[in-house]
Amino acid sequence: MKRTPSSGRVAVLMATCNGAAFLDDQLSSIAAQTYPDIDLWVSDGGSTDATVSILSDWTQRWTKGRIHTLRGPRQGRAANFRSLIVNPNIQADYFAFADQNDLWEADKIAASVRWIEQNAFAVPSVFCSRTITIGQDGAVVGSSQESSSDPDFRNALVENIATGNTMLYNRMAHDLLVQSCQKAEFSSHDWWLYLIVTGAGGVVHHDSLALVRQRQLDGGGGWWARTAYVKQLVADRFAGPADLNMQALIRNSDLLTEEAQEICDLYWKVRSDNFIKRLYYLRKSGVYRQTTWGQAKLYLVALLRRL
């Protein structure tokens, strides 16, 4: 069943901290959205630059709704987003995450709402997309990969392909997210949304369109990044954030489908002392990463007993 997209209100949730260098450009790209009704809710993590001043200036000239700037918990990025997610004063039909350094294509919100309302409006649903990577000067340096498989819970357990700055989700997904956050913490707001929505039987769609220009601030990836990653496997646990995710899933088991609970039980057994059993349960659980390289890394960390 499909229906014509509505013009329901969108609440954009943004976490800021010393983002003055690129914040004005990002706010300009949100203001230029073709979608009409947008409230911006900003949790600031204690900026000491001109971030708050820029937000104050934009508050006076925002024409799509209202801008609300809140004092964040000042405990890091995850806590900043969490404070926005659980804030009962933020009411909307749709919700979107935003980072302070990016640029949004003009049709980002409209395309996201359109897909949800035409394909998955009756269930908890999330739209996300590919990104174009730009340098600090705005020049294009690359793009994210297209997903080889549809997003699902088996993938979400071991990989986050749903980048937060591309996400827009409906009210049903938001209510589910809020309910889950009342029982547990997360290491990453976007990864947790991907997990809890797919685990509860909702829909996550990863679109081939690139609707966000994501600014690269750390020197990028490539083979140097891959080498560093392998070194990390040897030096430390691969699954620090995944540990927190599993604990949160256990606390929210009542929200999960029966199938998702069974997958969790199998995946938990991958931590067996016996390496043959580790590989057996990993295969039986069906969890997977999107690329051949990623799948190889998954089995490598299982062999090294770092899942």
Image (tube, rainbow, N blue to C red):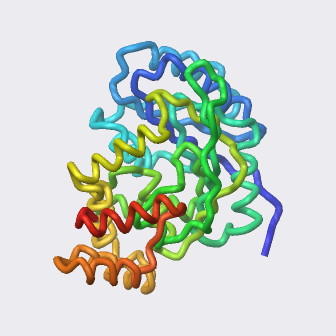
Count the numbered circles shown: 0
Residue pictured at 61% horizontal, 71% vertical: 123
The image quarter containing residue 72 is top left
Residue pictured at 73% horizontal, 59% vertical: 115
- Towards the viewer: 277 or 101: 277
Residue 247 at x, y percent in the picture: 26, 66
Instruction: Look at the picture and state if 167 lies above or below 181.
Output: above
Residue 62 at x, y percent in the picture: 65, 25
Instruction: Look at the picture and state if 16 lies above or below 57.
Output: below
The image quarter containing residue 15 is top left
Left or right of residue 84, residue 39 in this image: right
- Towards the viewer: 7 or 200: 200
Residue pictured at 61% horizontal, 29% vertical: 134
- Res 60 seen here: yes
Position of the C terminus, as image quadrant, is bottom left
- Towards the viewer: 79 or 230: 230
Residue pictured at 46% horizontal, 28% vertical: 219
Residue at the right extreme of this rendering = 4
Left or right of residue 90, residue 266 in this image: left
Residue at the left extreme of this rendering = 273
Instruction: Look at the picture and state if 216 lies above or below 81.
Output: above
Residue 76 at x, y percent in the picture: 31, 37
Instruction: Look at the picture and state if 62 lies above or below 300.
Output: above
Position of the N terminus, as image quadrant, is bottom right
Left or right of residue 64, residue 47 in this image: left
- Res 93 seen here: no
Residue 108 at x, y percent in the picture: 70, 43
